[in-house]
Amino acid sequence: MQRRLLVFALTAHLVSSCAEVGPGSTGRPEPSLEGSWHLVSGTTDAGPLRLLPGHEVTLEVTGERASGRSACNIYSGDVLVDGDRVRFRALGSTEMACEPAVMVLEQHFLTALSGVDSADLRNEQLRLTGRRVTLKFQRQRPVRTAGLALVYRAP
């Protein structure tokens, strides 16, 4: 009797841990985009993205919201995830102006991000792809502030 209960419990656990497959789903588990990411490389139909020192490109995902820095401005929008299928929609951004090279990077990045249709997550690296688009991100680790002290010395 105990053996049957053990087998039943193990079977129930295995079945409950499998990914759900629904209409339109690929049957693969959804990659967790949650968290903070920084762009390490990218290519678009215009060619490779030329990352510029001091003009970081980031992605922050919280639930169904995405935001980040797009080299010059701050952007935000919706992110929809279904299996390994990913779409960024309703992207908007602030409208500051930067040097021409920074603005080109920003325009190409935002165009690429809106063209993404799938995601792959391996070893803390996120790869977003679409038709003639590949964006590679590295997960950003939170800065540890415990134990830090702010010291102010009057001049």
Image: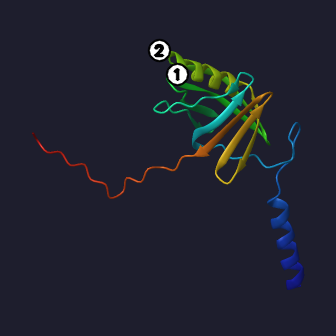
Residue ID at (50%, 22%): 73
Nearer-the-camera pick, 50 or 22:
50
User: In this orientation, which residue lies closer to the viewer: 43 or 9?
Assistant: 43
Q: Residue at x 82, y 52 (%)?
A: 19
Between disc 1 and disc 2, the foreground one is 1
Compare marks 1 and 2 and give the one earlier in the sequence: 2
SS label for mark 1: helix
Give the residue drawn at x 54%, y 46%: 140
Between marks 1 and 2, how big is the CA–CA gap?
Answer: 9 Å
Q: Nearer the viewer, residue 106 or 48?
A: 48
Tag shown at residue 54: none
Percent across and percent down for residue 72 are 49, 23
Q: How is the image coloured?
A: rainbow
Task: Point out the image quarter for the N terminus.
Answer: bottom right
- Image quadrant of residue 59? top right
Name the image quarter holding residue 84: top right
Q: Position of residue 15 (x, y in %)?
A: 85, 61
Question: Which amino acid type is shown beneath numbered disc 1?
Answer: Val
The circle on residue 97 is 2
Assign a secondary structure to mark 2.
loop
Residue closest to the eye, 70 or 41: 41
Q: Is residue 47 left or right of residue 150?
A: right
Which residue in the protein does label 1 denote?
Answer: 102
Image location of residue 77, percent across then percent down: 62, 26
